[in-house]
């Protein structure tokens, strides 16, 4: 069992009550069985999460929709697992879905993991989505500074010159100053 699956298993053990079904989902090699969990009615969330995670990490695209839903969950730990599995899945729909989640103003409180996933994916959608989201976070009094910081760090890591203007604007925000300066330096536009 790899470290990511082990972490997921530990987190979901109590939620599942340590049931036989929980143990079975962790060890089965049958992808059809796992896929069935995603479509069967009355399956608990923990079971769907294990099945989606395992299928996603195995590159089985039947997990895509469930993983996107989990990426947008209010529980950050579920989002972390979903982001990891989506990155492993390597589905071409993932960047567009992550960009849509990250830039949805109604769900901005849950945008941190989609932002980090966009950075990791380095897809064509990544830079425009992070610029859009960061621009919205630079208004006075915006409470989502952690999302803004993730955008700044992501834009620095992606190293795209299109981000210079928004990163210069971010430098005046106290919680973003150092990260924005570092990102600009990576772009060669530190002045």
Image (cartoon, rainbow, N blue to C red):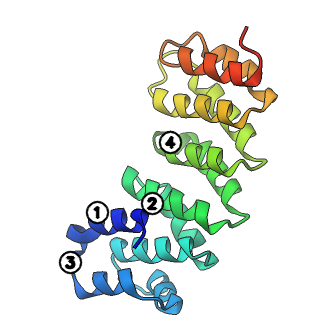
- Label 1, secondary structure: give it: helix
- Label 3 vs 2, first from the N-terminus: 3
- Label 3, secondary structure: give it: loop
Residue bearing the label numbered 3: 18
Q: Characterize the local packing of mark 4: few (<14), some (14-19) or many (20 or more) Cα atoms within 10 angstroms.
A: many
Residue bearing the label numbered 1: 11
- Label 2 vs 4, first from the N-terminus: 2
Give whichever of 178, 136 is nearer the camera.
178
Q: CA distance from mark 1 to mark 4?
A: 20 Å
Q: Characterize the local packing of mark 2: few (<14), some (14-19) or many (20 or more) Cα atoms within 10 angstroms.
A: many
Q: Which mark is residue 124?
A: none
- Label 3 vs 1, first from the N-terminus: 1
Q: CA distance from mark 3 to mark 2?
A: 19 Å
Q: Characterize the local packing of mark 3: few (<14), some (14-19) or many (20 or more) Cα atoms within 10 angstroms.
A: few
Residue bearing the label numbered 4: 112
- Label 1 vs 4, first from the N-terminus: 1
- Label 2, secondary structure: give it: helix
Residue bearing the label numbered 2: 81
Q: CA distance from mark 3 to mark 4?
A: 30 Å
In the rendered image, the residue lying farthest to the front is: 2
- Rendered location of residue 75, percent (x, y): 36, 53
Asked if the residue at tag 2 contacts the one at tag 1, i.e. Cβ–Cβ closer than 8 Å, the answer is: yes
- Label 3 vs 4, first from the N-terminus: 3
Which residue is at 42% across, 63% downward? 4
Which quadrant is home to the C terminus? Answer: top right
Residue 56 lies in quadrant: bottom right
Asked whether, in this view, residue 185 is left or right of residue 57, the answer is right
Which residue is at 57% across, 19% downward? 139
């Amino acid at each position: 069992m790899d470290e990511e699956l082990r972490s997921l298993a530990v987190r979901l053990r109590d939620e599942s009550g340590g049931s036989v079904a929980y143990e079975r989902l962790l060890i089965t090699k049958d992808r059809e069985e796992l896929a069935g969990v995603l479509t069967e009615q009355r399956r608990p969330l923990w079971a769907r999460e294990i099945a989606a995670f395992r299928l996603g990490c195995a590159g089985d695209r039947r997990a895509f929709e469930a993983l996107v839903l989990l990426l947008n969950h209010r529980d950050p730990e579920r989002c972390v697992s979903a982001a990891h599995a989506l990155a492993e899945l390597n589905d071409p729909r993932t960047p567009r879905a992550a960009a849509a989640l990250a830039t949805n103003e109604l769900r901005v409180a849950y945008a941190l993991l989609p932002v980090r996933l966009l950075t990791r994916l380095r897809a064509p959608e990544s830079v425009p989505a992070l610029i859009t989201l960061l621009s919205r976070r630079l208004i006075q009094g915006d409470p989502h500074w952690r999302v803004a910081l993730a955008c700044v760090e992501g834009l620095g890591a992606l190293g795209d010159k299109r981000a210079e203007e928004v990163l210069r604007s971010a430098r005046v925000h106290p919680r973003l100053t150092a990260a924005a300066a570092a990102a600009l330096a990576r772009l060669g536009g530190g002045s």
